[in-house]
């Protein structure tokens, strides 16, 4: 019996054969000239994706490690932190700031909603002593994409630094670090960068460096000054995951060869097709089209059918894995990712499996209507 699996979750995502081959390269010493050369070219490529001239650090940890790196270097005990929350990962960012004894002002916009810029403006005026603002580019738990450009413009008028969780968005959704005033952008390897988990990337602006130098929080592995000391020699403070660096070099080459504008267009059309299919099947989306993510689609489960039960049927019978809901929407929603190493036929397979799963769960589905809706989008009709 064949056991072919289709991974349609927002991380870890499928890894292209080219990247798998690169990860399998013989290990080299991380204190050698060869590694330094690779490290330098990786940073230059990441800077292109981030659209920044700022320092970029490639650190061996996960997305949450990237977020903790940002907090550990900017939040001293008692510092006021404005946290803009639109879902589970916004909550996580706030919780890391609390762990570093920041005085966190949480503004929760609710699951399925995006950040309201008017509220941000009000909060910044109300708390002129806010030192750090936390925002999520792409809220993985709800499929909402936030207006980082708008948030950045507001924060830039204040002394505060803007830290952005770009873990699931960067590489699939455009971000302009320098132009939009993002002081620290955090992302990780296992989403749109098409790698296994294990690498984080963090950019640091001059404004963020000034804050980091004066920061009083204890930090060792997460210390950016430690990484900065060896940055000019293209070294790393601690032992890096050499194999994943090889993989990142290969995945960045793939992305830049496709052209970042084309990468973003591909993600946008996959998202439009997925949303069209979901609507054609009579299911409801969590996020409105206005703020819907291009890298994943969050869907409410049908009435009287548990979203997790539906996911189990689809995985067991068709080998297609969707992600479940998180936090207050656990068991009520499911998420279809279309990020990284993903193309039109992956979406067609996912939608087809969804239709069959719905039919088996007893939902009144007309077979083929979702697939047809997706096909129409791909055909430009």
Image (cartoon, rainbow, N blue to C red):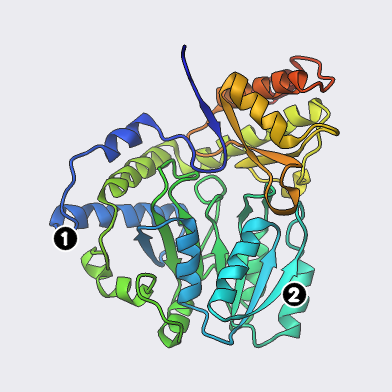
Q: Position of residue 79 (x, y in %)?
A: 58, 85
* Depth check, front residue: 21 or 254: 21
Q: Circles 2 and 1: CB distance less than 8 Å?
A: no
* Depth check, front residue: 134 or 318: 318
Q: Position of residue 156 (x, y in %)?
A: 60, 76
Depth-wise, is mark 2 or mark 1 nearer the camera?
Answer: 1
Q: Is residue 321 left or right of residue 274?
A: left
Give above or below for 370 relative to 25.
Answer: above
| Residue 343, quarter of the rendered image | top right
Residue in view at x 45 percent, y 62 percent: 65
Which label number is shown at residue 31? 1
Can I make out residue 148 in this image?
A: no
Helix, strand or loop at disc 1? Answer: loop
Residue in view at x 73 percent, y 36 percent: 307
Binning the other alpha carbons within 10 Å of mark 1 as few (below 14), some (14 to 19) or many (20 upward) gives some
Q: Is residue 199 left or right of residue 76?
A: left
* Depth check, front residue: 225 or 50: 225
Residue farthest top in this picture: 1
| Residue 113, quarter of the rendered image | bottom right
Q: Which residue is mark 2?
A: 121
Helix, strand or loop at disc 2? Answer: helix
From mark 2 to mark 1, how far is it between C-alphas? 47 Å
* Depth check, front residue: 334 or 120: 334
Q: Is residue 234 left or right of residue 19?
A: left
Can I make out residue 213 in this image?
A: yes
């Amino acid at each position: 019996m064949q056991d072919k699996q289709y991974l349609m979750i927002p991380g870890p995502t499928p890894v292209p054969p080219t990247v798998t081959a690169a990860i399998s390269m013989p290990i080299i010493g991380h204190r050698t000239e060869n590694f330094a050369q690779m490290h330098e070219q990786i940073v230059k490529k990441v800077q292109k994706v981030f659209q920044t001239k700022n320092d970029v650090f490639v650190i061996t940890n996960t997305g949450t490690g990237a977020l903790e790196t940002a907090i550990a270097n900017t939040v001293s005990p008692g510092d006021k932190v404005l946290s803009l929350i639109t879902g589970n990962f916004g909550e996580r960012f706030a919780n890391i700031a609390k762990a570093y004894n920041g005085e966190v002002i949480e503004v929760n916009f609710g699951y399925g909603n995006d950040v309201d810029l008017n509220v941000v403006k009000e909060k910044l005026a109300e708390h002129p002593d806010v030192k750090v603002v936390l925002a999520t580019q792409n809220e993985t738990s709800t499929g909402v994409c936030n207006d980082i450009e708008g948030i950045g413009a507001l924060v830039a008028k204040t002394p505060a630094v803007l830290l952005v969780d770009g873990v699931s968005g960067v590489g699939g959704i455009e971000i302009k670090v320098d132009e939009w005033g993002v002081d620290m952008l955090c992302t990780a390897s296992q989403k749109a960068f098409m790698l296994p988990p294990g690498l984080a990337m963090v950019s640091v602006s001059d404004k963020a460096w000034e804050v980091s130098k004066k920061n009083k929080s204890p930090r060792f592995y997460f210390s950016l000054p430690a990484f900065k000391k060896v940055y000019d020699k293209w070294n790393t403070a601690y032992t890096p995951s050499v194999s994943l660096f090889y993989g990142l070099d290969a995945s960045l080459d793939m992305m830049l060869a496709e052209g970042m504008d084309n990468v973003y267009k591909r993600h946008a059309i996959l998202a439009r097709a997925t949303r069209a299919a979901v609507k054609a099947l009579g299911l409801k989306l969590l996020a409105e089209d206005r703020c819907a993510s291009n890298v994943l689609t969050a869907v409410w489960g049908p009435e009287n059918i548990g979203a997790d039960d539906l996911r189990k049927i689809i995985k067991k019978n068709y080998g297609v894995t969707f992600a479940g809901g998180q936090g207050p929407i656990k068991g009520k929603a499911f998420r279809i990712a279309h990020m990284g190493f993903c193309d039109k036929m992956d979406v067609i397979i996912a939608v087809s499996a969804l239709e069959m799963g719905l039919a088996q769960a007893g939902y009144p589905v007309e077979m083929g209507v979702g697939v047809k809706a997706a096909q129409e989008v791909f055909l430009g009709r």
